Amino acid sequence: MYATLRTYEMAVDWDDELVRHLNEGFMDQVAHVPGFVAYYSLEAGARVFASVTIFDSRAGVEESNRLAAEYVQRRLLDRFPTPPEITAGEIRAHRVG
């Protein structure tokens, strides 16, 4: 499995509109990428947004990063004015449950 962690500095605080964008917009897109396993977003600090997306393949991670950049450019640029820090790679250890 592979994961990507994207961390963004936000121009504004979290609100219901951002959560709606995630639930009804971006997650619907990323969930259709082949090999999708899971998506998580978290409030990682004052005006810091982070997301973790997990796939069965490196190609899925790369596609999700492309989709995220495109989605931010089209719909959320006012909230995320600078590019994210992206960390991606193969998952070496994990546990569920």
Image: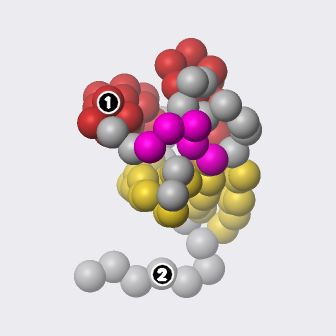
Residue 9 visible somewhere in the drawing: yes
Q: Is residue 92 above or below residue 11?
A: below
What residue sits 40% from the left and 83% below the top?
95
Is residue 66 shown left or right of residue 34?
Answer: right
Element under label 2?
loop
Label 1 crowd bin: few (<14), some (14–19), many (20+), radius 10 Å: few
One can see residue 52 in this view: no
Confirm or deny contact between disc 1 and disc 2 (CB under 8 A): no
Magenta includes 91? no
Quadrant showing the C terminus: bottom left
* Residue 10 picture location, percent across and down: 57, 42
Left or right side of 59 for 32: left
Percent coordinates x, y for residue 18 in the rendering: 37, 34
* Residue at image point 45% right, 36% down: 30
Question: What is the basis of the colouring in this image?
Answer: secondary structure
**What residue is pinned by disc 1?**
17
> Foreground mark, 1 or 2?
1
Image quarter (top left, top right, bottom left or bottom right) of the N terminus: bottom right
The amino acid type of the residue labelled 1 equals Glu
Sequence order check: which comes first, mark 1 or mark 2? 1
How many discs appear?
2
**Region in magenta:** 9-13
**Disc 2 marks which amino acid?**
His
Residue density around tag 2, few if under 14, some if 14–19, many if 20 or more, within 10 Å: few
- Name which residue lies at 67% across and 31% down: 81
Q: Is residue 11 magenta?
A: yes
Q: Main secondary structure of the magenta part?
A: loop
At 50% from the left and 19% from the top, the residue drawn is: 75
SS of the residue at dot 1? helix
The residue singled out by tag 2 in the image is 94
The one of 38 and 78 positioned closer to us in this rendering: 78
From the top left corner, tell me how far across and down residue 53 is, in percent: 50, 53
